[in-house]
Amino acid sequence: MSTTGLPLRQLLMSLGEPLVELQAAPAGLDVPVREVAILDPEDPATANPGELVLAIGARGRAALPALRAAGRAKAAAVAVKLDAPGQADALREAATEAGVALLSVRSETRWEQLDALARAVINGPDLPESTEAGSGAGGVGDLFALAQTTAVLTGGIVSIEDTSSRVLAYSRSADSDEVDDLRRLSILGWQGPEPYLSKLREWGIFQHLRSSDSVIAVEPHPELGLRRRLAIGIRAGAQPLGTIWVQEGSQPLAPQAEQALVGAARVAAAQLMRRRRELSADVRLTRTLLTGLLEGSTGPQSLATHLGLHQHRPATVLAYAAVGADLSRTEVTGLISVHTAARHRGALLAPIDSRVYVLLPELPANLPMTTVRDWAQEVVDAARDHLGIALRAAIGSTVHGLAAVPASRAQADRILDAMGRGGVVPEVAALIDVQAEVLVSEVLALLQERPALRDPRLAALTAYDARHGTRLAESVLAWLDALGEVRVAAQALHIHPNTLRYRVRRAEQLTGIDLAQPQQRLLAMLQLRLPSEEPNEPS
């Protein structure tokens, strides 16, 4: 998070067309933007000072509450999508009255794209005012600054992409007519469109960029909407890291464009490698602090300070377990991470033993439990559909602050433990959904751990069945579950009612238990659910 903030003017210069368009700026363009906040349509309209509020799902006049809340909170700007051109007038009037800037977002733009790019601009150094690149690896600044500097030095329009052709940063363009279809569609889609990418592969451009440090020219193809451009691979030794593309605008590229591009690729390589190292170290530290918090060995202060989290906002823990699968597999944890992050930006993931835990911090105070359940169900469905893995998900209690997170995790574990012991339970559950199942499961666990609490006559009955191939214990339990309704129990076992009556009498004769006694019936209903053991047979 930027402490001083980036002027709105600078943010607009970095993002610019084709992502956003300024509709109103009643407080001017020098207001500082310190952070990006996502306002989900289910959330109450709130904001904080200096925020750029992305009003997701609130098209047109539905964004009016967000504008008013942002104005009251002294937010920097609100970004909305418009359904129709006429809607801008009403929103501009409301923004002016609220004293907050209004940005319209093109309908093709993905919110996650705008969020990521805006955060990259805000949290990175300001774009350079001079045209001189620094001599060291870090002298140019962040990738947006590098793209802008490269554009100045080459006289072209620059984009920096990763190895999957996803746009990481780009230079601003004063004249949208200079931008060709490939650049426009790449920025709007956050990735080069496949028809264009296939042509570049066909021409051998990508092969050259992966294997060479030299600049390659791509000649214009007006029939494809492509202008001339230069490209160079970003490499660290033999490892490809991405590419830099310079599109020619209305004027030819500068004579020293290729030389500038070589230097830009080397600076970009240093920045990307440093970013990878920093990200790796940050991920490890975050994982360590999160694991410690979940296990109760580390207090909340360390994680809150590290990530800038509010310690006293509501939070909950989701826990996932799999049937016959290893949740440490990258594709499983990746699926859980991606789906959860799509619903909650601050979600944090930590595999512990055979389970994966997701902490959802800073939840809205009135977030419905059904919403969290739907999020977890999406993960379970995706794991089944895409990976062929059956997941169970448990929703821990919503606690008031990070200090109580271990209690939420403990509740999620209780639910998963009950799910693992069988019975009719849903794929996704909170405690309220399976309260009886959880409590019975924990009583059974206590009986399993402490043999002294069990009736040896019932243990001997299950052993008798195991040795003789009979089904006396099963029949008694079915009869008890049916509340003594012989026909119901017999139908569940697919046997004749007289056979069931005989088995219940035989069980009483062998063990000496009296099923007419309520306490003995209650104990039998519990103990006969335990896995069978083989103590001495009844005499």
Image: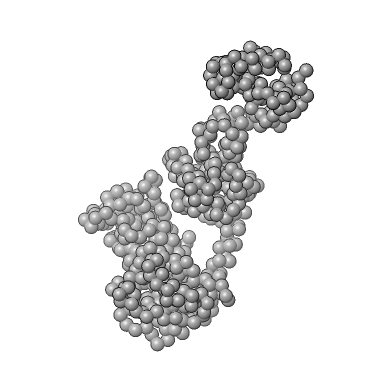
Q: Residue at x 63, y 12 (%)?
A: 516
Q: Position of residue 451 (x, y in %)?
A: 73, 27
Q: Nearer the viewer, residue 51 or 212?
A: 212
| In this picture, residue 33 sits left or right of residue 136 | left
Q: Is residue 385 visible?
A: yes
| In this picture, residue 174 sits left or right of residue 372 | left
Q: Nearer the viewer, residue 27 or 447?
A: 447
Task: State the count of labels.
Answer: 0
Q: Is residue 132 above or below residue 172?
A: below
Q: Nearer the viewer, residue 485 or 371?
A: 485
Residue 514's image quarter? top right
Q: Residue at x 78, y 24 (%)?
A: 536
Q: Is residue 25 visible?
A: no
Residue 92's image quarter? bottom left
Q: Is residue 307 above or below residue 140?
A: above
> Seen from this angle, which residue lies furthest bottom?
255
Q: Residue at x 46, y 84 (%)?
A: 259
Q: Position of residue 538 (x, y in %)?
A: 76, 19
Q: Is residue 357 above or below residue 330?
A: above
Q: Residue at x 72, y 16 (%)?
A: 510
Q: Is residue 203 above or below residue 106?
A: below
Indicate how the structure is coloured in the image. Answer: one colour
Q: Position of residue 75 (x, y in %)?
A: 37, 56
Q: Nearer the viewer, residue 504 or 44?
A: 504
